[in-house]
Amino acid sequence: MQDEQTKRILVVDDHPDNIQLLRARLEARGYIVEEAADGEAALARVYTSPPPDLILLDVMMPKIDGFEVARRIKSDESLPFIPVIMQTALDSTESMVQGFEAGADDYIAKPVNFRELDARVRSLLRIQTLQSALQQRERELSAANAQLLVLSSTDVLTGVANRRALEERLHDMWEHSQRLHEPLSLVMCDIDHFKRVNDEYGHQVGDVVLQQFAHLLVSEAREVDRVGRYGGEEFVLLLPGTVLDAAVTFAERIRECVEKREFTYGDGQTLHRTMSCGAAAWPHPLIADQEALIKAADDALYVAKETGRNRVVRFDSREFNEHVSKNGTTDRAS
């Protein structure tokens, strides 16, 4: 914490003699004293860095009076807590009430009793120190909570959204689509024969492939889309405002990118992989809720795997329906 004797005090008064008298007294107590001759100068000083730790503010000033200066300072939530002691020759209850309503933290009458001033300054600076420490702890706590929120919604390996975050975002997108009658597409994609990467090259290389694959998906997606890892080598892309034809086209473009991609690992070594995709969208008569949308894309992905991999299959397409009709079901073990 900043030591009390190094605190900055801004003295605001339109009479130079009053400023010099207060400066001499406060500097003798070890404070750093700054001055402003009117309300405009005082407000300008408050927004410089570092701001004053306390303001000794005269009420009667040209341009902007002390009441308005206090009101503006105290109403600005971007400013830290800055104690304001108002000083005035208007020794009346009405004046004191007006000062406190403007946001003043304390009041002292002119001519100033310096022993009283010393006590009031010390008291408010102690409060300011405690308040500053509290605000710092709140900022640290807020930052820690924000970091925890990111960690709780992010897949640690790839940096994209995790399954829980995907499902929450899908819920929001689904509600939005239902409310505004806008289309929503979902693409589920899977790296073909990924187990062979782990078996032949090791899990560390597999992790690198997953990271590069996720980065490719993010680089191809729009800002409004959401990319996430659904589990293992399976990823999901949420495409709001996108009809099924556009989702298939988008998935096909990514499939081609992956097919041409060299995944690098180790000392410049490379390997190739392909991907399969299943695409589904709402509105569709067979999709009544978000769970059905996920299942539709997952079923389409399964058909893509079963019919040769390295392809995009559209839910309820002729290829999809022919495969389901021939095989009877898309249910399978994970």
Image: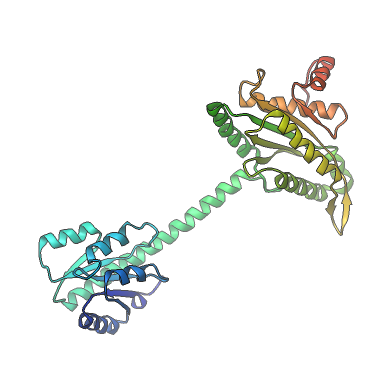
- In the rendered image, residue 180, in percent from the top left (x then y), is placed at 54, 28
- In the rendered image, residue 16, in percent from the top left (x then y), is placed at 23, 82
Q: How is the image coloured?
A: rainbow
In-front residue for pair 124/71: 71
Up/down of 85 relative to 190, above or below: below
Residue 189 in view: no
Q: Quadrant of residue 307?
A: top right
**Residue that appears at 73% across and 29% down:** 245
Name the quarter where the C terminus is drawn. top right
In-image side of 319 versus 179 (left or right): right
**Residue that appears at 18% across and 78% down:** 114
Residue 174 in view: yes
Name the quarter where the N terminus is drawn. bottom left
Q: Quadrant of residue 31?
A: bottom left
**Could you tell me how many numbered marks the image carries?**
0
In-image side of 273 versus 223 (left or right): right
Up/down of 2 relative to 81, above or below: below
Up/down of 231 relative to 270, above or below: above
**Residue that appears at 66% across and 43% down:** 222
- In the rendered image, residue 24, in percent from the top left (x then y), is placed at 25, 84
**Residue that appears at 70% across and 36% down:** 236
Up/down of 91 relative to 273, above or below: below
Q: Quadrant of residue 298?
A: top right
- In the rendered image, residue 217, in percent from the top left (x then y), is placed at 73, 44
